[in-house]
Image (cartoon, rainbow, N blue to C red):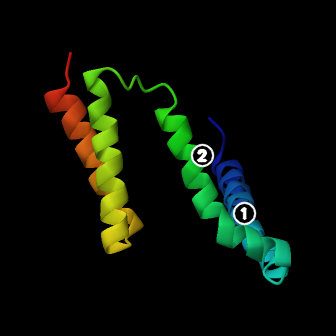
Amino acid sequence: MPDAPYLLAATAVSAAVTWALRALPFTALKRLRSSGTVQYLSARMPAGVMVILFVYCLRDLPLTEPRAAAPLTALAVTAGLHLWRRNALLSILAGTTVNVALCGLVFTG
C-alpha cells in the first residue's frame, strides 16, 4: 500500500487537473461570446439538436404496428406540453413518463 504523502499528492494532482479541465471551457467561452458565429449557433442549435434527436429516436419506428403508439403519444404529449407551458424540463419529464408508462403497462409483450 502506498504511503500517506504519496496518496495525498496523487489526490491533490487529480483534484487540480479536474478543476482545470472544468474551468477551461468557461475561460474559452469568455473570448467567444462576442463572436458572430457563436451567437448565430447559440440561436439555431437547440432546434437543430432537437430535430436530430427526433429523427434518430423515431427512425426505426414501425408505424404499422400497435407498439408505435407509445412513442408517438409521448411525442405528442411532449410537443403539446412544451407549446402550452414553454418549460423544457416539464415537457421532457412528462413525455418520458408517458412513454415509459405506455411501454411498460400497455404495450408489453
> Which marked residue is nearer to the observer: mark 2 or mark 1?
2
- Are the residues at dot 2 and dot 1 in contact (C-beta closer than 8 Å)? no
Residue at 57% of width from left, 50% of height from top? 51
Residue identifier under label 1: 16
Question: For numbered disc 2, what is the local secondary structure?
Answer: helix
* Residue 72 rendering spot, x and y as whole percentages: 33, 40
* Residue 25 rendering spot, x and y as whole percentages: 75, 67
As shown in the figure, which amino acid type bears the numbered disc 2? Ile
Q: In this view, does 12 lie above or below 86?
A: above
* Residue 3 rendering spot, x and y as whole percentages: 66, 45
Q: In this view, does 42 lie to the left or right of 30?
A: left
Residue identifier under label 2: 52
Residue at 71% of width from left, 49% of height from top? 6
Q: In this view, does 28 lie above or below 102?
A: below
Q: Residues within 10 Å of mark 2 (few under 14, many from 20)?
A: few
Residue at 85% of width from left, 79% of height from top? 35
Q: State which tag comes first along the sequence, 2 or 1.
A: 1
Label 2, label 1: how many angstroms apart (C-alpha)? 36 Å
Q: Is residue 10 left or right of residue 89?
A: right
Residue at 52% of width from left, 30% of height from top? 59
Q: Which of 80 and 91 is in front in this view?
A: 80
Is residue 62 visible from the viewing direction of this image?
yes
As shown in the figure, which amino acid type bears the numbered disc 1? Ala
**In which quadrant of the rendered view does residue 64 lie?**
top left
